Image: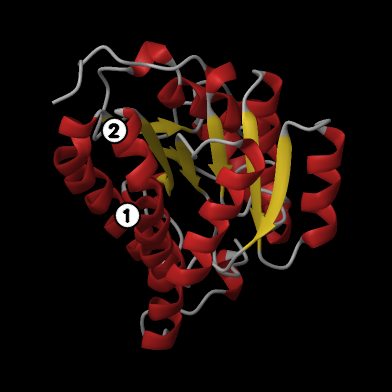
Amino acid sequence: MTDSGIALPLDEQIVLVTGGGRGLGEHLTRAFLAQGARVVVNYLRSAGQAEALAQAAQGRAVALRADVTDAAAVREMFDAARRHFGSGVTTVVNNALPAFAFNGDARPHADTISWDDMSRQFEGVVRGALNTVQAALPDMSARGFGRVINIGTNLFQNPVVPYHDYTAAKAALLSLTRTLANDLGPKGITVNMLSGGLLRTTDASAATPQEVFDLIAAGTPLRRVTTPAEFADAALFFASPWSRSVTGQNLVVDGGLVKN
């Protein structure tokens, strides 16, 4: 059993951001770099963007390719990160998402969605998170410290669009978040979820019609749509010493649209 108060400042952490080279992942990467952390920028197809981010960080980041659904590739990525930084990953941000366009008008409805659609999201979201957590466990357990931040969605509380596959996978990830929190807490590892709504704008939300952005903005207390940078800043809390007694939680960051 570890000391319940153990914590590492952000500038002493080695953070892995899956899908960290573009979209929301890029903002998550930049948020941690801004606080002095070292960052592993994981990518699958966005080599140029991930490498550019790493080069701009002047030695505090490395871009590593791995398909998060491939457990062996994920373990190799963690080994490469350890060799590069001389120490193991302390913090995992599970952000990677299988290809998905946030446009409700173009998504399959209940009568047409296939199990292949569902399975693709479960593989990338749930299996991907399981693979990264299992690869991170040896170093986190040895240190007696670890932070896992899973990226969720407010849609399983406010299912206003028929994103059946995406929403079901993220809901399953919340369940995994809570069971892992219970299982890993004695090792000094916290596991939390950060859930957003529609963000203005990422690669995935670029397909969203303007009227949808306007409708969501009107429904929030802040009367605006959350930006990726604002969402990414909230991830810092779950990694920081200020959250050392917070685990198994789901923080919704959507301008107050959904009351959690």
User: Which residue is painted at 45% across and 77% down in the image?
Assistant: 120
- x then y, percent, for residue 179: 17, 47
Quarter that holds the N terminus: top left
Secondary structure found at label 2: strand
Which label is found at residue 173?
Answer: 1
- x then y, percent, for residue 210: 72, 50
User: Which residue is painted at 45% across and 81% down in the image?
Assistant: 117
Q: Is residue 56 above or below residue 167?
A: above
Instruction: Tell me if I can see residue 105 in this picture.
Output: yes
- x then y, percent, for residue 20: 65, 48
Q: Which residue is mark 2?
A: 189
Packing grade of label 1 (10 A; few <14, some 14-19, many >=20) is: many
Q: Is residue 67 above or below residue 205?
A: below
Of the two numbered discs 1 and 2 on the same chain, state the one appearing first in sequence. 1
What type is the residue that disc 1 sits on?
Leu
Which label is found at residue 202?
Answer: none
What type is the residue that disc 2 sits on?
Ile
Secondary structure found at label 1: helix
User: Which residue is painted at 43% across and 69% down in the image?
Assistant: 71
